[in-house]
Image (cartoon, helix red, strand yellow):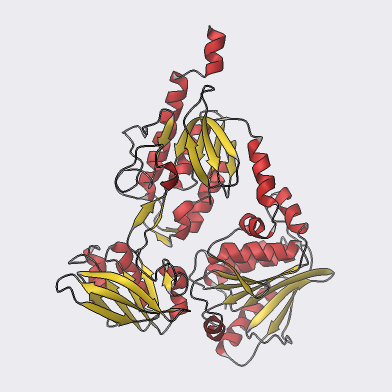
Amino acid sequence: MLDTDLKEQLQTYLERVTRPIEIEASLDGSEASQEMRGLLQDLAALSPQIRVDENGDDPRKPSFTLGTPGQDISIRFAGIPLGHEFTSLVLALLQVGGHPSKLAQDVIEQVRGLDGDFLFETYFSLSCQNCPDVVQALNLMAVLNPRIRHIAIDGALFQDEVESRQVMSVPKIFLNGEVFSSGRMGVEEILAKIDTGAAARDAEKLKAKAPYEVLVVGGGPAGAAAAIYAARKGIRTGVAAERFGGQVLDTMGIENFISVKETEGPKLAAALEQHVKAYEVDVMNLQRAEKLLPAGADGLIEVQLANGAALKARTVVISTGARWRQMNVPGENEYRNKGVAYCPHCDGPLFKGKRVAVIGGGNSGVEAAIDLAGIVSHVTLIEFDGKLRADEVLQRKLRSLPNVKVIVSAQTTEVTGDGAKVNGLVYKDRGTGETHTVELEGIFVQIGLLPNSEWLKGTLALSPRGEIEVDAHGRTSLPGVFAAGDVTTVPYKQIVIAMGEGSKAALSAFDHLIRTSAPAEQQQAA
């Protein structure tokens, strides 16, 4: 089942296990069950601590639980955790086997202190790069707190459940039978939703923080680079971010990051966070900025957060990035995660054998159509322009696929549905003005990015597209405030460019600091 190299690596990891691991499998005569049996037999052969029992009677087949004698742990994998989920399996084995996690001690205590009974069910796909974060977070919580149970379910393997529960995007989380959340979440984000007092406690901690010399708002490539460059100058640096890694977390394959031939977004995001935390940087996750106030008499700029707290700093670097642009047509929001999706890698497997559309004819749209064509029955690619804008090599590949139809000069005007899920879209032929309806089950929107700058309107100069206007040094229209990355007017939204701009903005902020004395320093000099 597992190749030799993978077995050797896994055996090394399993040497860290300090207590027995009991695996109970529920299997039937299906091919998937045979595959799971092979995987579990490989695991048992790699460590004397692992014992496999195939007498489970769970209705979800194939599936298996992980446990250890004397501990009330409830973790189940319904499906075969390979692909992106293999790491989730390895971590679950280690944690059930007694190896400690790297989670901060205060967060561990918060999980252990949760009062209530929580049954989480997470639907994932093996090609989803966002799903492992959710699966790993909930598995760890189930190890730490016996009142938390978690079942990770491969949506592609349990299609009947996906249909009956109308799961049309992954990761999709249910809590005690009700929809809890969609999309990437970590332990802290899950806690913020179920621990009602967490936000208020967090706000009080933030209010007590001393001012920073450089405060970076945003944790993507630009923000990470800015934080590292600022910290290397030996100045007090903080990072406030909604989610560290930003849009990189939603990027599947990265093949143009210079010196690294190929990597994946989540891996790069994790490396960025590790690099930042190697310095004395105060990283504040799950923090959404809502307002920027210019420096007052104390010379400090203020950033107000959604939880009611405020952070102050002598300089600020804004790197809040961008998000997927929406079509803004009737039905899009109503059917978001009910057939309207933005991540073909994550959600594509849920549409196996179905008809889908891809909106957008740039590189992202054509790549999405190519990937989906190998999963779904038919792809209709719709482009507003009179021709596709993707690289020619991608267009050639697209044209070679028999189950793809390309429609250009077409304006999508409506997403239609039956109240529960998407059943089609309407587009207008820009040449004739005629409208047409396409019957389908899924729509993947790939039409570019929208800067995350709404909170800055009226404070900083923004371009007509909403991007922060910056000069060659990353300076904005407000003294002491700098900006970098996809949220700015700098052209070409690329990871390497964002990193360079973030580094430059931090250096410019440092230059501003050494040329501008703080009010207290001015008084002492007088």
Q: Which residue sits furthest bottom?
A: 29
Left or right for 166, reference 387: right
Above/below status of 242 relative to 97: above
Left or right for 440, reference 169: left
Instruction: Report if residue 10 is visible in the image.
Output: no
Q: Which residue sits furthest left?
A: 432
Q: Residue at x 62, y 30 (%)?
A: 210
Q: Quadrant of residue 96?
A: bottom right
Instruction: Report if residue 315 is visible in the image.
Output: yes
Q: Who is closer to the viewer here, 90 or 136? A: 136
Q: How many numbered callouts?
A: 0
Q: Where does the image place residue 347, in percent across and percent down from the top left? A: 46, 72
Q: Residue at x 58, y 60 (%)?
A: 185
Q: Residue at x 77, y 58 (%)?
A: 112
Q: Who is closer to the viewer here, 481 or 276? A: 481
Q: Where does the image place residue 199, in percent across and percent down from the top left? A: 65, 50
Q: Quadrant of residue 467?
A: top left
Q: Where does the image place residue 88, in percent across and percent down from the top left? A: 61, 66
Q: Which residue sits furthest top?
A: 526
Left or right for 7, reference 70: left
Q: Where does the image place residue 238, in percent across and percent down from the top left? A: 56, 37
- Position of the N terminus, as image quadrant, is bottom right
Q: Who is closer to the viewer here, 512 or 87? A: 512
